[in-house]
Amino acid sequence: MKPIVTDTYDFPTLIEKRYVYVDKTALLRRMISGVDGRFFFMSRPRRFGKSLMISTLEQIFTGNRKLFKGLAIAKSGYDWNTYPVIRLDMSQIRAPDLAGCRRVLCALLADLGIPYSIDLSGEDNPGRSLGRLIEAMRRRDGKVVVLVDEYDAPIGGLLDNPEMLGDMRSLLHDFYLTLKVHAEDIHFLMMTGVSKFTKLSVFSGMNNLTDISMSPTYASLLGYTRTEVEQVFKSHVKAFAAKLKKTPKAVVGDILSWYDSYRFSPESNVRVCNPVSVGRALQERRFYGFWDATGSATLIVERLRKLGKLPDEIEGIRVFPKKLDVCDVKTLPFAALMYQGGYLTIKDVDPSGELILGIPNREVRLSIYDGLVDLLLADSADAFTSTAVSLKRVLDESDSAETIGRVLKSVFAMVPHEWKFKSEAETKRYFLLFMKMSGAAINAEVESANGRADAVLETRKSVFVFEFKYGKSAKSALKQCHSRDYAAPYATDRRRVVYVGINYDALKRNVDTLTDTLNDTLSDTLNDTLNSRMLSLIRQRPGLRRPDLMAALNVSESTLARRLREMRASIGFRGSAKTGGYYVLKSRGDAQ
């Protein structure tokens, strides 16, 4: 069983040390053939294998044929011509100020010039350095291959520094303009990044740059398909399944639930998994949110906080593909930010071509919720998460309405003093954040015939219907539950139904709760009505059989059995189990 490695993006290392490698060289062979163009750009979220792709292309163009033994490109008839390669990792361009970034970039180019006897050490203009390097390499070895990894990394690290951000944008604009000027000297160009900043010169100036980010042809180039997980990682899946005492098929299903469903092309239904997360899950043999461990979601959750939305509230965003390009770093449209960061993906496409976006999988959903909790609660975040986990355990074991009330008081007491709830909506959002963190099966704004309950929590034994008030009383919340009959959709549900009225008191900075278990009070209304209907039906149709009675009342067998037990003093049964029916009794023990 080959070992899995998730922190190495160097193709020679993966091959020479015999690590697991998912073969994508058939698609790379097509890309370099020229059939789709020569200058390419591809955006993908972080940790999707962009750097490994760049490394693989570098080895192809430098003719390192032996590394590709047994891979698709080795069987394709590729000619293995060699080219001089300029490989730039723009994530290295980090410094406290613009002058420092310029020096780092110039130093990087100077190092690339040494093998070609080009002295670039005195240059302080990165664009000029790149131009001189391309010209010298072309003169000596022919047309150049340029591979730019994470082209937008210097911008991405400055999104919270508007002043320096504008200067960096100008620097990169001039730097990438060199590629346009020297287009005739370039045999092949590949640029990768997270975002497509269309006002940078590489996009506004290079008309022959092919953006394959949404190409159906290259939809599976980065990330793992289900087939690749099942085939390439077969032995690892089998070992993971043995640990969990599950079948390999079930473990693959769990992997897809946690890490799959990234769809990058409107014209293809291909979905891929996050490769780093899959690798780590199989390596460590556990399901976990590895997304957070590989980068920060601070900007994402800050935007969510400002919008006043929970992750579930951004499901179903509609947007046309062009809107997912970031025209300017200063605008950062929300949908584009979320999509390019990997927090939203294409769920569906309507006939007009509009994309319907949603959160791809469980890992990303948890990442966003965890980020929100950390941002909102700071030092109380761990206690909040721990309490949420304990609530799930309590709900699984005891299903107690009183416990829910006590837990909610504890949770609202964790809110930092400087954070003040100003409305019922804010109060509900905090409550729902907590419930979602607990993993409870809760839905917000649940429709019924007479209105919408604020939230409904369903457990194995109970249905809890929540109504919120702000600055009023828990009693008024309960009154609204009753007056609007929020429990009506659960009238025939055999679980107990509990109304939970919650009021947030801004002076106390906490909640008061009142509960009302309806299987007693509800029976006085809904159940008595059901019993009366049943008695009337049997009186009109003596000998009514059990299936016919269930159909006439539109109830389940368990609900009918419960009603008949309650009415045993008034309703009797005569005949065999198959052909017998029900009759109204004149008195206990006597049939009509």
Image (spheres, rainbow, N blue to C red):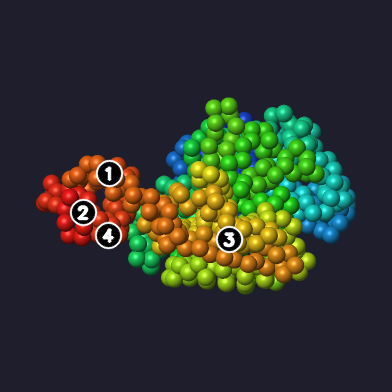
Calculate the distance from the C-alpha at mark 3 to the C-alpha at mark 2.
42 Å
* First in residue order: circle 2 vs circle 4: 4
Residue closest to the eye, 162 or 547? 547
Residue closest to the eye, 4 or 443? 443
Q: Nearer the viewer, mark 4 or mark 3?
A: 4
Which mark identifies residue 585? 2
- In the rendered image, which quarter is residue 188 located in? top right
Which mark identifies residue 501? 3
- 10 Å crowding of disc 4: few (<14), some (14-19), many (20+): few
Q: Is residue 478 left or right of residue 2?
A: right
* First in residue order: circle 4 vs circle 3: 3
Point 41% across, 47% down: residue? 227
Can residue 458 be seen here? The reply is yes
Q: Nearer the viewer, mark 1 or mark 4?
A: 1
Disc 2 marks which amino acid? Leu
Disc 1 marks which amino acid? Leu
Residue closest to the eye, 210 or 506? 506
Tell me where residue 512 appears, x and y as whole percent. Answer: 63, 67
User: Are circles 1 and 4 on residues that touch, CB within 8 Å?
Assistant: no
Tell me where residue 487 appears, x and y as whole percent. Answer: 48, 52
Calculate the distance from the C-alpha at mark 1 to the C-alpha at mark 2.
13 Å
Point 60% across, 57% down: residue? 477
Which mark identifies residue 565? 4
* First in residue order: circle 1 vs circle 2: 1
* First in residue order: circle 3 vs circle 1: 3
Relative height, residue 417 to residue 57 (above, below): below
User: Are circles 2 and 4 on residues that touch, CB within 8 Å?
Assistant: no
User: Are circles 1 and 2 on residues that touch, CB within 8 Å?
Assistant: no
Secondary element under disc 2, as helix, strand or loop, is strand
Q: What residue is shown with label 1?
A: 537
